[in-house]
Amino acid sequence: MPQGCPRLLVPPPVIAPMTMPEPDRELRSPKREPRSVFLAMVAAMSLPGAVIGGVAIGWWIDQGQGTSPWWAASLGGAGLLAGLYQLIRGSQG
Protein backbone atom coordinates (compact mmCIF):
# COMPACT_ATOMS: atom_id res chain seq x y z
CA MET A 1 0.00 0.00 0.00
CA PRO A 2 1.51 3.37 -0.99
CA GLN A 3 2.40 5.73 1.80
CA GLY A 4 0.11 8.66 2.37
CA CYS A 5 -3.09 6.79 1.43
CA PRO A 6 -5.48 6.30 4.32
CA ARG A 7 -6.45 2.71 4.97
CA LEU A 8 -10.19 2.16 4.72
CA LEU A 9 -11.69 -0.32 7.09
CA VAL A 10 -14.57 -2.17 5.50
CA PRO A 11 -16.54 -4.64 7.60
CA PRO A 12 -16.84 -8.14 6.15
CA PRO A 13 -20.07 -8.80 4.23
CA VAL A 14 -22.90 -10.45 6.11
CA ILE A 15 -23.95 -13.66 4.41
CA ALA A 16 -27.55 -14.66 4.99
CA PRO A 17 -28.39 -18.35 5.06
CA MET A 18 -29.92 -19.69 1.84
CA THR A 19 -33.58 -20.53 2.05
CA MET A 20 -35.68 -21.95 -0.74
CA PRO A 21 -38.94 -20.15 -1.44
CA GLU A 22 -42.12 -22.12 -1.03
CA PRO A 23 -43.33 -23.31 -4.46
CA ASP A 24 -46.51 -21.73 -5.70
CA ARG A 25 -49.04 -24.52 -5.49
CA GLU A 26 -51.44 -22.94 -7.98
CA LEU A 27 -48.86 -22.70 -10.77
CA ARG A 28 -47.62 -26.24 -10.29
CA SER A 29 -50.98 -27.93 -10.01
CA PRO A 30 -51.52 -30.70 -12.54
CA LYS A 31 -54.80 -29.11 -13.59
CA ARG A 32 -53.16 -26.00 -15.05
CA GLU A 33 -50.06 -27.40 -16.74
CA PRO A 34 -51.74 -29.50 -19.44
CA ARG A 35 -53.94 -26.56 -20.43
CA SER A 36 -50.98 -24.20 -20.76
CA VAL A 37 -49.04 -26.78 -22.77
CA PHE A 38 -52.07 -27.28 -25.00
CA LEU A 39 -52.44 -23.53 -25.56
CA ALA A 40 -48.76 -23.24 -26.45
CA MET A 41 -49.06 -26.07 -28.97
CA VAL A 42 -52.18 -24.55 -30.51
CA ALA A 43 -50.44 -21.19 -30.79
CA ALA A 44 -47.38 -22.78 -32.38
CA MET A 45 -49.44 -24.60 -35.02
CA SER A 46 -52.49 -22.44 -35.75
CA LEU A 47 -50.79 -19.30 -37.01
CA PRO A 48 -48.22 -20.91 -39.35
CA GLY A 49 -50.77 -23.50 -40.45
CA ALA A 50 -53.29 -20.86 -41.47
CA VAL A 51 -50.69 -18.84 -43.39
CA ILE A 52 -49.20 -21.89 -45.14
CA GLY A 53 -52.67 -23.19 -45.99
CA GLY A 54 -53.72 -19.83 -47.44
CA VAL A 55 -50.55 -19.52 -49.52
CA ALA A 56 -50.87 -23.11 -50.77
CA ILE A 57 -54.48 -22.66 -51.87
CA GLY A 58 -53.63 -19.29 -53.44
CA TRP A 59 -50.67 -20.81 -55.29
CA TRP A 60 -52.94 -23.56 -56.63
CA ILE A 61 -55.46 -20.98 -57.89
CA ASP A 62 -52.63 -18.87 -59.36
CA GLN A 63 -51.32 -21.87 -61.28
CA GLY A 64 -54.73 -22.49 -62.80
CA GLN A 65 -55.49 -18.87 -63.70
CA GLY A 66 -51.99 -17.56 -64.41
CA THR A 67 -52.36 -14.67 -61.95
CA SER A 68 -49.23 -15.36 -59.93
CA PRO A 69 -48.70 -14.15 -57.11
CA TRP A 70 -51.96 -12.33 -56.43
CA TRP A 71 -54.07 -15.17 -55.06
CA ALA A 72 -51.19 -16.59 -53.02
CA ALA A 73 -50.48 -13.19 -51.44
CA SER A 74 -54.15 -12.44 -50.82
CA LEU A 75 -54.98 -15.79 -49.27
CA GLY A 76 -51.72 -15.77 -47.32
CA GLY A 77 -52.78 -12.44 -45.78
CA ALA A 78 -56.24 -13.81 -45.09
CA GLY A 79 -54.63 -16.85 -43.47
CA LEU A 80 -52.51 -14.56 -41.30
CA LEU A 81 -55.60 -12.70 -40.13
CA ALA A 82 -57.48 -15.94 -39.49
CA GLY A 83 -54.53 -17.36 -37.54
CA LEU A 84 -54.23 -14.23 -35.40
CA TYR A 85 -57.97 -14.29 -34.74
CA GLN A 86 -57.79 -17.91 -33.67
CA LEU A 87 -54.74 -17.20 -31.50
CA ILE A 88 -56.45 -14.29 -29.72
CA ARG A 89 -59.70 -16.19 -29.31
CA GLY A 90 -57.89 -19.21 -27.85
CA SER A 91 -55.87 -17.18 -25.37
CA GLN A 92 -58.93 -15.49 -23.90
CA GLY A 93 -60.76 -18.52 -22.76
Image (cartoon, rainbow, N blue to C red):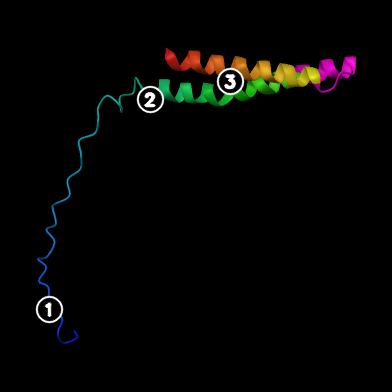
For residue 77, above or below residue 23:
above
**Mark 2, other Cα within 10 Å: few <14 / some 14–19 / many ≥20:** few
In this figure, which residue is indicated by the disc labeled 1? 6
Q: Quadrant of residue 74?
A: top right
Q: Give how far across and how far down residue 32 sits, in percent.
A: 35, 21
Gap between marks 3 and 1 measured at Cα? 68 Å
Mark 3 vs mark 2, foreground winner is 3
Dominant SS of magenta comes to helix
What type is the residue that disc 1 sits on?
A: Pro
Q: The magenta stretch spans which residues?
A: 57-69
**Mark 3, other Cα within 10 Å: few <14 / some 14–19 / many ≥20:** some
Q: Is residue 82 left or right of residue 88?
A: right
Tag 3 secondary structure: helix
In this figure, which residue is indicated by the disc labeled 3? 46
In this figure, which residue is indicated by the disc labeled 2? 33
Which quadrant does the N terminus fall into?
bottom left
